[in-house]
């Protein structure tokens, strides 16, 4: 209504202003015609006197005409050059001097040549719009000058137009003010009950069913308030009967769902999320997202959505348990779920098992929703894969020595009498070497398994690093001599003891030197170095460390193999099959160094050599007799050595 009233008032005001403008235009046209006719009449009477230069008669006639006609505002006479020589109420001064300003009328340049008709224009004054009429003065075909007459507007028309305009503006403003006041008043009257209703709805939503609204209103608002009070009364009655029991059941369900280790998502038949626990939020990356009430397919990872879209719609489309076939019923309970195994890449790489279970009503007739159970089986998959790879690798490594032993023993058993003593000895030596190889493999597997899976806490004690180095040199002294390789060591003088386990460190040196000996050609060099390094000034660990390097001038390791060199059963020689080995030595080294809370590093260049290095904490005297746990962060130490510089 307010909008319609304002629109009508705007239209009517526009029509009124249009009518007023039309009247003013007509009045202006009338003033123009009147001024033009009056000017022509006056010019015809004064032109002969002006031609005779009888200005006295012109003045007398003009004064008489001006005094008897109230519509004339002014009368001005100018000569052919535009100089004013007489005017009412303006006239030329009696005395002419150098200070006298000569007044002129500015007319178009070709006005004298086209002065047959009067020229009319209007200009605004404080008293209204004045019509200016310029009538040419001609006598006997000669142009004498111009007569300018100012015509006052029609006072009655102006007063009527102004009154109409003022009344229209007043009416328009009054209507707008009344409409605005009415709208504000109406809004104020409606705002209070609306606020009361809003407060009541919030209290009802919060569980306060005692909320009532008491406002003496009629009409639609009164009916709304009455319906609200009736609803609140019914909710209160319902609460007294069932809310407590339902709340308890809901709390138990939510507590149970939130505490289970697996992810749980409950969706209705429209695939909208009704309940989700923290585990499911973490697996699907829903932390901080309010997905309750949303379609679950819009928020699942894309790979899960592709896998579950069709099964979810199929399950949601079957409304009764009777739709399930008889084979499912004979299996015990209804087949209410389907299982999927999916590998996720977002939000984190993991493998999950998703079980979809139908949720029926208490009579097991109507489908009420779908329960989605999500199990993170990433660790299980990794363990199974690692176990399978381990078994496969061990079986492959055991097969060769067992086959060789069996072949040579069978040959000795069947053809022993036909073989020479040299052949029998050679066969037995081969079987013995394969047995040693088998023993080394089993020992390495046991050592690696013990290091990776054992929870044993090793007792670290001060170890003079020169002792395991010298013992390693003695062990491989004959091997390097037979192969023509130079094996040397460079231990910094007065090197403090390190915190570690002697036997484990001896095994590290044994594996690293043995590995270097295997891949170094005759004439090459193998070096073991140990020196003290200062801690980084910008690191929290202020303890000193001893850096140990094992370098060789062997064939080197390709960059693509360096990342996998510490993996179990990985052997560079697998590509050329020229050397034997279990592929477990470097894995054992890595695990032992990690037991010392450090890391082993590798720097290698093909055709130049390889350097393995790691850092061990210096033993501190104040901790003598106490089991220590080293904290070594090799990233904070000095720059890693180069493979070439370690052997110079």
Image (cartoon, rainbow, N blue to C red):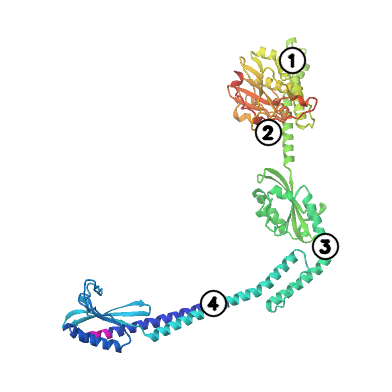
Q: Quadrant of the C terminus?
A: top right
Tell me which secondary structure the magenta stretch mostly adopts.
Answer: helix
Is 19 one of the magenta-colored residues? no
Q: CA distance from mark 4 to mark 2?
A: 77 Å
Q: Nearer the viewer, mark 1 or mark 3?
A: 3
Q: Are marks 1 and 3 in contact (CB under 8 Å)?
A: no
Q: Secondary structure at mark 1?
A: helix
Residue at the image position 60 percent from the left and 27 percent from the top: 558
Question: Which disc number belongs to residue 244?
Answer: 3
Residue position marked by numbered label 2 in the rendering:
540
Q: Secondary structure at mark 2?
A: loop
Query: Where 167 sits versus 631, above or below?
Result: below
Q: Quadrant of residue 481?
A: top right
Q: Is residue 542 visible?
A: yes
Question: Which disc number belongs to residue 168?
Answer: none
Q: CA distance from mark 1 to mark 2?
A: 57 Å
Q: CA distance from mark 1 to mark 4?
A: 118 Å
Residue at the image position 25 percent from the left and 75 percent from the top: 105
Residue at the image position 69 percent from the left and 49 percent from the top: 284
N-terminal label among 1 and 4: 4
Q: Nearer the viewer, mark 1 or mark 2?
A: 2
Q: Quadrant of the N terminus?
A: bottom right
Q: CA distance from mark 3 to mark 4?
A: 56 Å
* 616 lies left or right of 608: right
User: 134 or 327, which is in the foreground?
Assistant: 134
Q: Are marks 3 and 4 in contact (CB under 8 Å)?
A: no
N-terminal label among 1 and 3: 3
Q: CA distance from mark 1 to mark 3?
A: 86 Å
Q: Secondary structure at mark 4?
A: helix
Q: In the image, which residues are magenta?
A: 38-44
């Amino acid at each position: 209504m307010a909008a319609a009233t304002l629109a009508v008032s705007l239209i009517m005001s526009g029509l009124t202003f249009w009518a007023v403008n039309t009247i003013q235009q007509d009045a202006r046209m009338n003033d123009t015609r009147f001024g033009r006719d009056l000017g022509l009449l006056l010019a015809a009477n004064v032109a002969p006197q002006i031609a005779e230069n009888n200005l006295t008669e012109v003045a007398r006639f003009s004064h008489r005409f001006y005094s008897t006609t109230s519509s004339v505002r002014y009368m001005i006479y100018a000569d052919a050059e535009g100089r004013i020589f007489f005017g009412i109420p303006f006239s030329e001064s009696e005395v002419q001097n150098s200070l006298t300003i000569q007044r002129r009328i500015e007319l178009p340049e070709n006005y004298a040549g086209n002065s047959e008709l009067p020229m009319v224009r209007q200009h605004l004054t404080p008293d209204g719009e004045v019509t200016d009429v310029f009538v040419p003065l001609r006598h006997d075909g000669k142009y004498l000058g111009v007569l300018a007459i100012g015509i006052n507007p029609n006072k009655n028309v102006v007063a009527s137009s102004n009154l109409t305009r003022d009344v229209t503006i007043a009416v328009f403003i009054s209507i707008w003010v009344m409409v605005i006041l009415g709208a504000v008043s109406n809004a104020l009257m409606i705002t209070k009950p609306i606020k009361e209703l809003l407060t009541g709805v919030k209290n009802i939503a919060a569980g306060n069913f005692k909320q009532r609204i008491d406002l003496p209103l009629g009409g639609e608002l009164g009916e709304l308030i009455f319906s609200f009070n009736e609803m609140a009364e019914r909710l209160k009655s319902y609460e007294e009967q069932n809310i407590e029991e339902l709340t308890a059941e809901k709390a138990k369900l939510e507590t149970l769902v939130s505490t289970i280790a697996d992810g749980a998502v409950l969706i209705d038949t429209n695939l909208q999320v009704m309940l989700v626990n923290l585990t499911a939020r973490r697996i699907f990356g829903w932390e901080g997202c309010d997905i309750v009430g949303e379609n679950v397919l819009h928020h699942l990872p894309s790979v899960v959505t592709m896998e579950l879209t069709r099964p979810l719609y199929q399950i949601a489309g079957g409304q009764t348990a009777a739709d399930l076939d008889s084979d499912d019923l004979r299996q015990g309970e209804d087949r209410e779920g389907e299982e999927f195994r999916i590998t996720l890449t977002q939000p984190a790489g993991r493998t999950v098992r998703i079980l979809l279970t139908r949720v029926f009503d208490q009579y097991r007739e109507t489908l009420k929703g779908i329960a989605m159970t999500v199990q993170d089986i990433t660790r299980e998959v990794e363990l199974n894969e690692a176990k399978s790879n381990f078994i496969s690798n061990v079986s492959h490594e055991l097969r060769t020595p067992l086959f060789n032993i069996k072949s040579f023993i069978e040959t000795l058993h069947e053809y022993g009498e036909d073989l020479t003593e040299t052949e029998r000895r050679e066969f037995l030596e081969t079987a013995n070497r394969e047995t040693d190889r088998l023993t080394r493999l089993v020992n390495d597997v046991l050592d690696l398994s013990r290091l990776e899976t054992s929870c044993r806490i090793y007792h670290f004690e001060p170890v003079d690093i020169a002792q395991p180095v010298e013992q390693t040199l003695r062990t491989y002294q004959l091997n390097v001599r037979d192969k023509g390789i130079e094996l040397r060591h460079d231990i910094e003088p007065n090197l403090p003891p390190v915190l570690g386990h002697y036997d484990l460190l001896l095994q590290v040196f044994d594996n690293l030197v043995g590995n270097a000996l295997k891949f170094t050609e005759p004439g090459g060099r193998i070096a073991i170095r140990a020196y003290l390094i200062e801690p980084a000034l910008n690191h929290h660990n202020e303890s000193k460390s001893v850096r140990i390097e094992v370098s060789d001038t062997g064939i080197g390791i390709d960059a693509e193999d360096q990342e996998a060199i510490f993996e179990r059963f990985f052997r560079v020689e697998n590509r050329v099959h020229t050397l034997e080995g279990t592929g477990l030595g470097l894995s054992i080294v890595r695990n032992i160094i990690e037991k010392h809370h450090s890391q082993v590093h590798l720097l290698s260049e093909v055709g130049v050599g390889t350097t393995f290095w790691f850092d061990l904490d210096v033993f501190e005297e104040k901790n003598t007799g106490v089991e220590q746990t080293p904290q070594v962060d090799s990233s904070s130490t000095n720059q890693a050595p180069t493979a070439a510089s370690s052997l110079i």
